[in-house]
Image (cartoon, grey):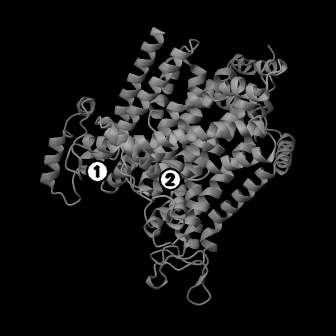
């Protein structure tokens, strides 16, 4: 039986970085060309770059302190002048805080929670999936049944149940959202590992006396990075949505940290008085960020694994 | 079939035990759970009394067994804010939530199948691009923001739909008052339309994409080619041959979708002040009413597990190839 040639792993190439430089350069060029060819992917990437810049440099770009309250500047419409040259470009909220400054700070929380939760969930899920798929038997049974139990809860409810007890906080949020995602990765990694463990190059690694841990992480793992990357991209989108929903419910980070979800939660009290800017701008920020991750996920899926392409 | 049934039932029981374990752990994870049941200003005596009354001074395994025993009887303790059994409070709010979930599931499926099929038939054309772009957008909009936007535009600006409230349908139906139930139905749907769209948009978008890709796959199958080569009209080929198989992936997902939608309903209900479990949980979170949160989450998980079991059993009955 012949196998499709796997991407050379670190074990095979002996290259410190995992892959030879020329191979990586060629792949990067191919990725860039594919992204330019798919205009949507380029748009998604541009949005993502903007969000990342905002997340990193937001505090320097913000015209006001996001928590500075001022009773005189309450509920100003977008474009209203403040003291001196300052302008409330996106208006101010019920405590007189600048909406734009809070949005800029909020990008940091959304992105941080999204990426950190994926790191937590992805790491746990990948290790669980590798172990489950490689060893099989009762270990596999136990890990997968734990996953089934977790999937029996609609995720947002599980998060609510834990966060109510643990209390709001950035770290709690990241942990709960991350642990909520592990089974997604575990299932995919397990399925891939099940088929890869029978491949000849894994057999060869075993025959050469490689340790199990090396087979798992240096021979099998590099060959399942493609589907993992795709899932991670979609997952960041769904984690950002969940973070917004939990913040909206009052279970997010403490009130002095501005988040898009908590801004939306506060906007509800001013809907009847038509203070539209309080709800529109944070919502748009979430939509564009999530959209960007979804578009990139779609593109990555087509680029990394054309077999998964949505018949488009 | 019987082996499948027994094995599937056993699996559900294991999962149910797991559910009780997770909810028990969630209580203990923050340290001594007694503090969740007393006010911040409680005296040491009061804390001790509560700890003894709720049994938190016993060994963990005994606490767990008694937790399971109570849970089996639907006893999650008294609600801290309503001062009556938490499960009773939750059960009162349940019918409204089920109504909204079923309605949004119905909307999502009823719209996603024709949209997905139409996009597949117009593959590569502007209609396909338009539907798929909307679907991508639909998967990126937070449901609660969608609700807020609809309240602002359709509720407050155009004044087409009510921005809050609920007219019960299931409640009179469960009470056997069919006349009232069906008299209420049009009004009930009118009040539910905005929250249902907000809850169902994500599922609608995801399923439209699923149906499209499944339809494209089906259209390439031999039996569709055979049907076409027999000279059957294109309309008949699509309606009678291709479509039946194209929506199968959506139908198989109904059980899972229901659970997913229930999660969404919890958030959206708070936006529309809809008197279901979501609003109850939201208030319970703010008042740290742990028994109500626990009873709600476990009840939803149990409904979710049972529903998936039923869907699987029906599926096994319909398709004899299904074996576990």
**Residue closest to the eye, B77 or A169:** B77
Residue at 66% across, 25% down: B244
Q: Position of residue A97 (x, y in %)?
A: 50, 76
Which sits in the foreground, A174 or B75? B75
Q: Where, by quadrant of the figure, is residue B70 drawn? A: top left
Look at the picture and state if A221 lies above or below A107. above
Res A152 quadrant in image: top left
Which quarter of the rendered picture does the C terminus of chain A lie within? top right
Regarding residue A296, the answer to whether it shows in the image is no
Would you name the residue on which mark 1 appears? B289
Image coordinates of residue B121 in percent, x first then y, are 77, 36
As helix, strand or loop, the secondary structure at mark 1 comes to loop
Q: Which residue is mark 2?
A: B194
Residue at x 68%, y 23% (from the top left corner): A210
Q: Residue at x 45, y 75 (%)?
A: A94
User: Viewed as shown, does residue B3 lie left or right of A301?
Assistant: left
């Amino acid at each position: 039986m012949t196998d499709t040639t796997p991407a050379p792993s670190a074990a095979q190439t002996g290259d410190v970085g995992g892959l030879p430089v020329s191979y990586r350069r060629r792949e990067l060029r191919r990725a860039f060309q594919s992204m330019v060819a798919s205009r949507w992917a380029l748009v998604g990437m541009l949005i993502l770059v903007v969000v990342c810049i905002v997340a990193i440099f937001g505090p320097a770009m913000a015209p006001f302190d996001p928590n500075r309250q001022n009773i005189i500047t309450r509920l100003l419409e977008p474009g209203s002048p403040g003291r001196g040259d300052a302008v409330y470009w996106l208006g101010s909220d019920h405590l007189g805080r600048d909406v734009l400054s809070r949005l800029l700070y909020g990008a940091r929380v959304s992105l941080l929670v999204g990426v950190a939760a994926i790191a937590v969930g992805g790491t746990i899920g990948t290790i669980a999936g590798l172990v489950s798929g490689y060893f099989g038997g009762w270990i596999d049974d136990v890990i997968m049944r734990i996953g089934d139990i977790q999937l029996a809860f609609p995720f947002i409810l599980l998060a609510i149940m834990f966060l109510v007890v643990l209390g709001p906080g950035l770290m709690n949020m990241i942990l709960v959202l991350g642990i909520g995602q592990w089974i997604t990765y575990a299932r995919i990694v397990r399925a891939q590992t099940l088929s890869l463990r029978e491949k000849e190059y894994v057999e060869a690694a075993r025959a050469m006396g490689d340790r199990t841990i090396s087979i798992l992480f240096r021979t099998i793992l590099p060959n399942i990075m493609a589907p993992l990357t795709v899932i991670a991209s979609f997952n960041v989108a769904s984690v950002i949505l969940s973070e917004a929903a939990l913040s909206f419910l009052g279970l997010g980070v403490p009130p002095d940290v501005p988040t898009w979800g908590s801004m939306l939660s506060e906007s509800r009290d001013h809907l009847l008085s038509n203070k539209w800017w309080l709800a529109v701008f944070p919502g748009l920020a979430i939509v564009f960020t999530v959209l960007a991750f979804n578009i990139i996920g779609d593109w990555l899926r087509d680029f990394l694994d054309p077999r998964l392409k949505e018949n488009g | 079939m019987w082996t499948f049934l027994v094995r599937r039932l056993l699996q559900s029981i294991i999962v149910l035990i797991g559910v009780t374990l997770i909810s028990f752990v969630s209580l203990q994870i923050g340290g001594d759970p007694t503090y969740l049941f007393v006010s911040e200003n409680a005296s040491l005596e009061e804390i001790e009394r509560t700890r003894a009354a709720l049994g938190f001074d016993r060994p963990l395994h005994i606490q767990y067994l008694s937790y399971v025993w109570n849970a089996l009887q639907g006893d999650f303790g008294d609600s801290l804010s309503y001062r009556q059994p938490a499960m009773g409070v939750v059960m009162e709010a349940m019918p409204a939530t089920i109504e909204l979930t079923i309605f949004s599931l119905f909307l999502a499926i009823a719209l996603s199948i024709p949209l997905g099929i139409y996009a597949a038939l117009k593959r590569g054309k502007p209609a396909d691009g338009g539907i798929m772009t909307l679907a991508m957008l639909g998967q990126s909009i937070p449901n609660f923001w969608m609700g807020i936007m609809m309240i602002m535009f359709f509720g407050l600006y155009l004044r087409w739909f009510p921005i809050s409230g609920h007219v019960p349908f299931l409640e009179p139906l469960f009470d056997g008052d069919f006349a009232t139930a069906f008299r209420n139905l049009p009004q009930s749907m009118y009040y539910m339309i905005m929250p249902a769209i907000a809850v169902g948009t994500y599922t609608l978008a995801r399923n439209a994409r699923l149906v499209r890709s499944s339809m494209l796959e089906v259209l390439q199958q031999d039996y569709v080619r055979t049907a076409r080569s027999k000279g059957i009209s294109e309309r008949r080929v699509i309606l009678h041959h291709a479509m039946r198989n194209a929506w199968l992936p959506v139908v198989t997902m109904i059980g899972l979708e229901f659970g997913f939608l229930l999660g969404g309903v919890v958030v959206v209900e708070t936006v529309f002040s809809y008197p279901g479990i979501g609003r109850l949980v939201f208030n319970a979170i703010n008042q740290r009413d742990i028994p109500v949160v626990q009873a709600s989450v476990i009840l939803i998980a149990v409904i979710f597990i049972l529903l998936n079991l039923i869907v699987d059993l029906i599926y096994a009955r319909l398709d004899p190839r299904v074996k576990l």
